[in-house]
Amino acid sequence: MLTIQSLREEKDLVIRALEKRHFDAKDSIEQILQWDAERRATQSKLDDALAKSNELSREIGGLMREGRKEEAEAIKAQTATYKSISSDLKEQMHALEGKIHEALCHIPNAPHDSVAKGRNADDNVEVFRSGDASTLEHHQKPHWDIADQCGLIDFELGAKVTGAGFPFYRGKGAKLQRGLIRFFLEKADDAGYEEFIPPHMINPDSGFGTGQLPDKEGQMYHMADDDLYMIPTAEVPLTNIYRDVVVREAELPIKLCGYTPCFRREAGSYGKDVRGLNRLHQFDKVEIVQFAHPAKSYETLDAMVEHVKGLLEALELPYRILRLCGGDMGFTSALTYDFEVWSAAQERWLEVSSVSNFETYQANRLKCRFKGADGKSHLVHTLNGSALALPRIVAALLENHQDAQGIRIPEALVPYCGFERIDF
């Protein structure tokens, strides 16, 4: 969440930045700053009351040592008064801190200067494209028909066992899935990311730390008896490794990666856009996460974008990169790049990755800091990206690499899945 210091020092800049999201924060921020001024004034009164109480306690101790018990007893009544005042002031402090915290939780991150003000996905800015979607020749079968014909994915069996959006992968479909996971993890390892196998459930503190709570609770599967949530992405457990941790400046950047299944309710999704692998309730993804020095986080973001570009180039897929506008960005992001691959059979773009810089927004929730050269603690910048999400990658591979005889596996992927083709 935004820091009180940023609101105090850059109130007008933050308000203008949030306008890019079409989020009117002026009244909320003014109210927060008013509560903050009251909190600081209350803190000052509390400090004075505690100081006076301590002074009287020392005076009482001196009198008792001198045998002046009656005078000491007379002063004790004053200390009781100050203790009562201090208790009331502490309650006022806690109440104000609670109001400030609650209000800050409902204000999204301030977008980076480069973010456009647009309202929705139509206003996103294309910044890079590889391959010309309009010249692709193989507009033949959609991936769900290929998967059924070749026995790769069984959507009906998944619906029987669990429900829609929980497919079975089988045979070469399972091997392709496993090969992609290995390929993505080994490329992350080559790039210096430490691999983790994290838990697939998180507690509410972890959900709050990365911004899923209180913003996205309706999108997660919740086990009420244990108050645990199924992870929507490996970002959540990986980033929370450093919750309430102070790292050394020399440790930055910290680079983590992990493969997990991801679970999303996707309530309200329906129609052609969710057919086949386009939108699932459970899917596999490799996630990359970095904790960066604030002065270098945008260099880090560029490097993460290049990493994802390299994966898509190796898979020989036409793709484009979009810089999201303010109205289409996630609640916690300061700047997000979306990667989309072209689906030849569906004749549309499919999102396969988001790479984001959250600046200090998550770190403030996580209380993740580094000790700087000045001896003070500073909030890190957190970043993450999908590298990559598998379902739409599989869909694009099946649809874009098909010919009359079947599906050609990209050369870079062959060593990981163990075969060169999937025949019709």
Image (cartoon, helix red, strand yellow):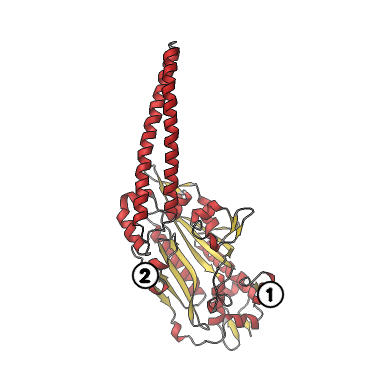
Give the residue at x 53% y 84%: 345
Report the residue marked by disc 1. 157
Q: Quadrant of residue 266?
A: bottom right
- Counting labels gives 2
The percent position of residue 398, horizontal first and vertical second, equals 57, 80
Report the residue marked by disc 2. 118
Height in image: 131 above or below 2? below
The amino acid type of the residue labelled 2 equals Gly
CB contact under 8 Å: marks 1 and 2: no
The one of 134 and 95 positioned closer to us in this rendering:
95
Q: Secondary structure at mark 1?
A: helix
Give the residue at x 42% y 50%: 379
The percent position of residue 89, horizontal first and vertical second, equals 42, 36
Quadrant that contains the N terminus = bottom left
The one of 120 and 302 positioned closer to us in this rendering:
120
Outermost residue toward the top in this view: 67
Q: Secondary structure at mark 2?
A: loop
Mark 2 surroundings within 10 Å by alpha-carbon count, few (fewer than 14), some (14 through 19), many (20 or more)? some
The amino acid type of the residue labelled 1 equals Leu
Height in image: 223 above or below 324? above
Give the residue at x 44% y 43%: 95
The one of 307 and 42 positioned closer to us in this rendering:
42
Q: CA distance from mark 1 to mark 2?
A: 42 Å
Q: Quadrant of residue 261?
A: bottom right
